[in-house]
Amino acid sequence: MSIVVVGSVAFDSIETPSGRVDHALGGAATHFALAASYFTQVRVIGVVGEDFTAANEDVLKKRGVDTSGIEHVAGKSFHWTGSYTRTLNEADTLATELNVFETFTPKIPASYCDSEFLFLANIDPKLQARVRREMPKVKMVCGDTMNYWIKDHSAALAEVLVDLDVLLINDGEAKMLAEDANLVRAAKKILGMGVKTLIVKHGEYGATVFFSERSFPGAKPEAHATPFRAPALPLAEVVDPTGAGDSFAGGFFGYLASKKGELTPGNFRKAMFYGGVMGSFAVEKFGTERTQKLTREEIDARFEQFRALSHLD
Ligand code: AMP
């Protein structure tokens, strides 16, 4: 059950209270692919420049990720510079150098066309819509976006939302998208835009999934009436929050894909926990360092910690 992910493959320069890194491997597609690779086969579509080395690509290949959809072109790779010194909950973007990403036109290798799952990472909604159109056979599509696209590209974004199985966005973005400061009302409005299921991420406080009657085809109405909240793991030190959201998405979607996209309430709930598990690992070290070298045992042990954290006898 393979997932195709389209998004940024990048270098990140990051400053946090724990230190700083310069040009660490990053990008939404990279974080997503590494996290999801512990659950299922992942195939990446992206673009990089001449500064992206074979060693960088090997990080993905070592996890079994198919990189044949990463296009190599002349110029420099996307470079994001961010700081978390003001608050660990939100990055202050200091610079976004699009470089080769500015003219990115996603190309889908023929070998990816039998994939059943698609993740549209945070990129121009016009490109998200295009990839979606070019992969008509996928049976489940999850997507992400950010305030920039919500604010200035709402018409293009609306076209993506209308056809999305799961939208994953953070709290503030959900309220901005719905133009409503109340989360429950905001969720209802977003589900009314066509999104079948909405996941709202609350950073260090976990994530909530809001269902619609289209979340579980054929299920009883009670199945979608109540949202479900999964915790985040309280950690003594968050070294670098970059990529937590994409790692959450990787754990969530990777798990659902490993269950063949069987959309039962139970699978959704477990997927939310696996999302939290992968997000919690991502923030323990800078960049992708922690997510590169996990074991299935570590993932399962942390899943049990999540279960204990919120279990009621
Ligand atoms: P998150 O999971 O939200 O922390 O995503 C962080 C990743 O998104 C970083 O590795 C960045 O390289 C990438 N990123 C930051 N800004 C953008 C952007 N405007 N478009 C695409 N990717 C971005």
Image: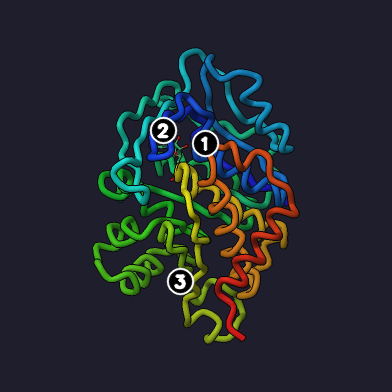
User: Where is mark 1, residue-wise?
Assistant: 287
Q: Nearer the viewer, residue 105 or 53?
A: 53
Looking at the image, residue 172 lies above or below residue 123: below
Q: Secondary structure at mark 2?
A: strand
Q: Nearer the viewer, residue 107 or 83?
A: 83
Q: Viewed as shown, does residue 244 lie left or right of 265? A: left
Q: In the rendered structure, which disc, 1 or 3, sits on the residue that comes first in sequence? A: 3
Q: Amino acid at mark 2?
A: Ile
Q: Residue at x 60, y 81 (%)?
A: 219
Q: In the rendered structure, which disc, 1 or 2, sits on the residue that comes first in sequence? A: 2
Looking at the image, residue 164 lies above or below residue 9: below
User: Which image quarter: residue 190?
Assistant: bottom left
Q: Are marks 2 and 3 in contact (CB under 8 Å)?
A: no
Q: Amino acid at mark 1?
A: Gly
Q: How busy is the neighbourhood of tag 1: few (under 14 within 10 Å), some, or many (20 plus)? A: many
Q: Is residue 80 visible?
A: yes
Looking at the image, residue 144 lies above or below residue 22: below
User: Where is mark 2, residue-wise?
Assistant: 14
Q: Residue at x 51, y 28 (%)?
A: 24
Q: Amino acid at mark 3?
A: Phe
Q: Residue at x 49, y 48 (%)?
A: 244
Q: Residue at x 39, y 56 (%)?
A: 170
Q: Secondary structure at mark 1?
A: loop
User: Residue 220's x, y, as percent?
Assistant: 58, 86
User: Residue 271's x, y, as percent?
Assistant: 61, 63
Nearest to the eye among marks 2 and 3: give it: 2
Q: Nearer the viewer, residue 5 or 93?
A: 93
User: Where is mark 3, residue-wise?
Assistant: 210
Nearest to the eye among marks 1 and 3: give it: 1
Q: Are marks 1 and 2 in contact (CB under 8 Å)?
A: yes
